[in-house]
Amino acid sequence: MKLRSKEPYWLLKNGLIGTYPSLQKDIACDVLIVGGGITGALIAYQFSSEGYRTILIDKRDISLGSTSASTSLLQYEIDEPLYALIKKVGPNAAIDTYLEGVNAIEKLTALIKSLKADCGFQLKQSAYIAHSERDVEWLATEFEARKRIGLTVKWLSKTKLKQAFGVMGEGAILSDVGASTDVYQLVRCLIEQSVKRYGLKVFDHTELIHVDYLKTKCEVTVTGGHQIAAKKIVYATGYESQAMLKDKVVDLISTFAFISEPLKIPAYLKRTLFWDTEDPYLYMRTTDDDRILVGGEDEQFKNPERRDRLIDKKQDVLLEKVSSKFEGLKLIPDYAWAGTFGVTKDALPYIGEHPDYPNAYFVLAFGGNGITFSVMGMQILSDAMAGRPNKFLEYFRFGR
């Protein structure tokens, strides 16, 4: 599947993050990770750092799937508001997931510091803006739900929102936990350090062709007929995983983004992520090289060709929306692209075992919170591998 179109800014800015050989011999490991995007990189770091003999393979160059098209907003908020998620999955799963989102950002912050990773990581606050008077009612309900579980949030009136940020909106939730990054560079740092520190082996242009799922291991055939004997497989193949599964677990969505030419950005915009409740929604963040990234205008995915034809039109719509939303903000688009992401029935990921695939785990971090869900997956799979209990294995299980 073609997961992105045109060249996303991160790829143009950074070039190839590193090239690795294709597999040219038979090999054995404790854990084989399939997929070299941000999810695979995080899980590879986790397992290799714990002493497991770990191999990562990707049929493309590393991080050239949907990760390279990510807009890399890091928020604890998921695609379903807390108050609505409680109704869908119950208070325990909903509240625990929101709180763990905060923990995930804190964990990623600590990890990036320990790696000394040069990946444009910046801690930020987050403003969730009510687009209309009708949206104010449910957003106020969401504000109270977050307050009740101990999240640090502040309500901004229409007047205060405009005074603080020059934003046209009917009100907003201001959260003090959020971040942004260059996810493409983050993948590079994670993989480089996993190789250097912990002996991770990486093979790109190495496609999984066939797997024999045996009682105590998996025998994997890859490109060229070479074999990998793995005690466990982790599928970090994102939206392409749906083809492996009998039951539909995700609806694919086309999303669009552009990034501006460099400009002088006020400090209050630099330190804040913005998300608007308009349908289709609009979001905005700054980058570490003084550009503004704008995204949204999602619609149902039909095929890559149709999605690609819409890029210029969607850029124009996004530019018009953000210009009307942020008073005095003048943006000149520099690059525009499209990507594919997915939504599940309850906005939660699928992480853990699947009955059809013995000795295998999936980390399917669907939705707008793919990075934070993948960070959660590091500990979830670590516990699963070691036989330790983890409540998120129940919350995020297949067949829930």
Image (cartoon, rainbow, N blue to C red):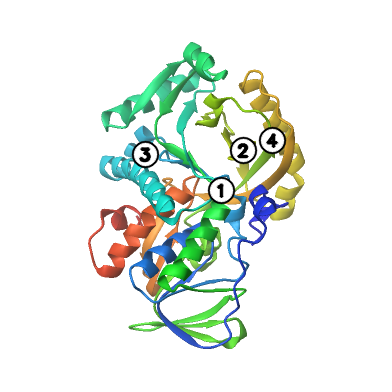
Q: Give whichever of discs 3 and 4 has the lower sequence position.
A: 3
Q: Which mark is residue 349?
A: none
Gap in angstroms between the C-alphas marked 2 and 4: 17 Å
Query: Residue 193, percent across and down?
Result: 46, 64
Mark 3: few, some, or many residues within 10 Å (few <14, many ≥20)? many
Q: Which residue is mark 2?
A: 295
- Tell me what residue is drawn at x 48 percent, y 52 percent: 366
Query: Residue 250, percent across and down?
Result: 50, 53
Q: Give whichever of discs 2 and 4 has the lower sequence position.
A: 4
Q: Give whichever of discs 2 and 3 has the lower sequence position.
A: 3
Q: Which residue is mark 4?
A: 262
Residue 64 or 192: which is nearer the viewer? Answer: 192
Q: Amino acid at mark 4?
A: Pro
Q: Is residue 37 left or right of residue 141?
A: right
Q: Nearer the viewer, mark 3 or mark 4?
A: 4
Q: Which residue is mark 3?
A: 85
Gap in angstroms between the C-alphas marked 2 and 3: 24 Å
* Whether label 3 touches label 4, CB < 8 Å: no
Q: Nearer the viewer, mark 2 or mark 3?
A: 2
- Per the image, label 1 sits on a secondary structure element best described as loop
Residue 168 or 289: which is nearer the viewer? Answer: 289
* Whether label 3 touches label 1, CB < 8 Å: no
Q: Amino acid at mark 3?
A: Leu
Gap in angstroms between the C-alphas marked 4 and 1: 16 Å
- Per the image, label 4 sits on a secondary structure element best described as loop
Query: Can you say whether 46 is above or below 213 in the image?
Result: above
Mark 4: few, some, or many residues within 10 Å (few <14, many ≥20)? some
- Tell me what residue is drawn at x 65 percent, y 36 percent: 291
Location of residue 22 by image quarter: bottom right
Q: Which residue is mark 1?
A: 182
